[in-house]
């Protein structure tokens, strides 16, 4: 088993609160990713689960057993760090076997387990080599192998791919996803890279300033962010935000105005919103060239041609940054005005406190079973 429960977990240094009343339940076999900006507390939380940092308050339970006072070796966890932390004078075999030798496991059993893990990680032909003879990806696999041989209840990964180049990171993401599927083990993974989070996780935990901003499946966070922070953090390029005024609310939705244009958004209305300043969110990939339910004309200052896509950066008439992710052959030019259309069904709406209005179901979300809960 590999169930983890965090009950009101807190961490403070003097008067500074790093983590505030963290509540989270992780099921056996889940792949959970902690994601957030630098300083949000994600690595600290991982180290607390591992037993490398103490808790200021709350309880950490693994398979129902409180482990706050247990040392790392007694928690049933294995951790893979950002730095590979390999012994350079040892062979790959000895690096992987090291924790088993510490446990004084019989030699025959050590060889059986190391060779089995090496085969899974495609290191079976590298066992006699030393780390200095390996690529970065191979070294990271050795570090992962050293964790696997311990057969822990929970694997902890602290930004394990951040030292690799972009192509190798993509390959390792695939390898780790396959490894999770094969081992069926509980894995908790820390990263600042939302691409890793979106492509690997069963559920994502978004942290902000020591609090959990939202927990959900990747597509749930993408389509139904609960607040402005998650909406702006999940997605690349980030979501556009427009200041709008609420002019009407009906059972069918909320009507807002921007620069003399009005648009009715299919979100659950709230009493007392008329006359208030709200925030409309629209992802760059949901903008279209030409007219929409609302049309905004901007002049791009920078255009990036990426082959399959073109990214145009501009500023709104009200001064906010604005980005459009268009097709690779989009006929747009720097310093040449372009009209971008916004469709009401693609919009998000947030109140003055940054809390999202509940979106009505649309065909995109309905086509995604087991990822997004019905409104």
Image: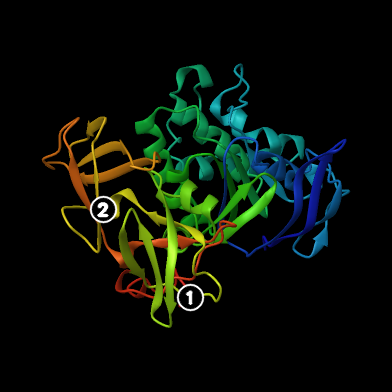
Q: Nearer the viewer, residue 182 or 363?
A: 363
Give left or right: position of 158 versus 161: right
Q: Residues within 10 Å of mark 1 (few under 14, many from 20)?
A: some
Q: Is residue 261 visible?
A: yes
Give left or right: position of 230 versus 257: right
Residue drawn at point x = 31 percent, y = 48 percent: 284
Q: Secondary structure at mark 1?
A: loop
Q: CA distance from mark 1 to mark 2?
A: 24 Å
Q: How is the image coloured?
A: rainbow
Q: Which residue bears the numbered disc 2? A: 287
Residue drawn at point x = 26 percent, y = 53 percent: 287
Residue drawn at point x = 57 percent, y = 46 percent: 189
Q: Which residue bears the numbered disc 1? A: 269
Q: Nearer the viewer, mark 1 or mark 2?
A: 1
> x, y (%) of residue 290?
15, 53
Q: Residue 364 occupies which quadrant of the picture?
A: bottom left
Q: Residue furthest bottom?
A: 251
Residue drawn at point x = 35 percent, y = 52 percent: 283
Q: Is residue 308 visible?
A: no
> x, y (%) of residue 101?
72, 35
Q: Secondary structure at mark 2?
A: loop
Give left or right: position of 127 versus 82: left
Vertical placement of 109 versus 126: above or below? below
């Amino acid at each position: 088993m590999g169930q983890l429960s965090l009950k009101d977990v807190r961490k403070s240094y003097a008067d500074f609160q790093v983590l505030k009343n963290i509540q989270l339940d992780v099921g056996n076999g889940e792949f959970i990713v902690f994601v957030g900006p630098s300083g949000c507390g994600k690595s600290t939380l991982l180290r607390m689960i591992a037993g490398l940092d103490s808790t200021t308050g709350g309880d950490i339970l693994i398979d129902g057993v409180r482990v706050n006072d247990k040392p790392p070796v007694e928690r049933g966890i294995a951790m893979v760090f950002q730095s590979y932390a390999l012994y350079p004078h040892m062979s790959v075999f000895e690096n992987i076997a090291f924790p088993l030798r510490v446990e004084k496991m019989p030699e025959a059993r050590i060889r059986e387990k190391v060779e089995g893990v090496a085969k899974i990680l495609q290191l079976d032909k590298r066992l006699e080599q030393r780390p200095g003879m390996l690529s970065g990806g191979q070294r990271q696999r050795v570090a992962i192998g050293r964790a696997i041989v311990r057969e822990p209840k929970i694997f902890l990964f602290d930004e394990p791919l951040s030292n690799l180049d972009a192509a190798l990171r993509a390959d390792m993401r695939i390898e780790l996803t396959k490894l999770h599927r094969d081992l069926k083990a509980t894995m908790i993974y820390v990263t600042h890279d939302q691409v890793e989070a979106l492509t690997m996780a069963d559920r994502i935990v978004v942290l902000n300033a020591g609090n959990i901003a939202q927990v959900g499946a990747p597509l749930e966070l993408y389509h139904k962010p609960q607040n402005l922070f998650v909406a702006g953090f999940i997605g690349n390029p980030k979501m556009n935000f427009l200041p709008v005024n609420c002019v009407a609310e009906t059972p069918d939705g909320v009507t807002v105005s921007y620069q003399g244009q009005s648009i009715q958004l299919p979100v659950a209305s709230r009493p007392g919103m008329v006359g208030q300043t709200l925030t409309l969110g629209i992802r760059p990939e949901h903008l279209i060239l030409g007219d929409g339910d609302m049309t905004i004309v901007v002049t791009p200052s920078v255009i990036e041609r990426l082959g399959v896509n073109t990214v145009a950066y501009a500023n709104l008439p009200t001064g906010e940054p604005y980005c459009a992710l268009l097709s690779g052959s989009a006929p747009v030019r720097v310093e040449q005005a372009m009209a971008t259309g916004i469709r009401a069904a693609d919009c998000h709406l947030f109140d003055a406190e940054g809390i999202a209005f509940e979106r009505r179901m649309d065909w995109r979300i309905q086509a995604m079973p087991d990822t997004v809960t019905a409104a």
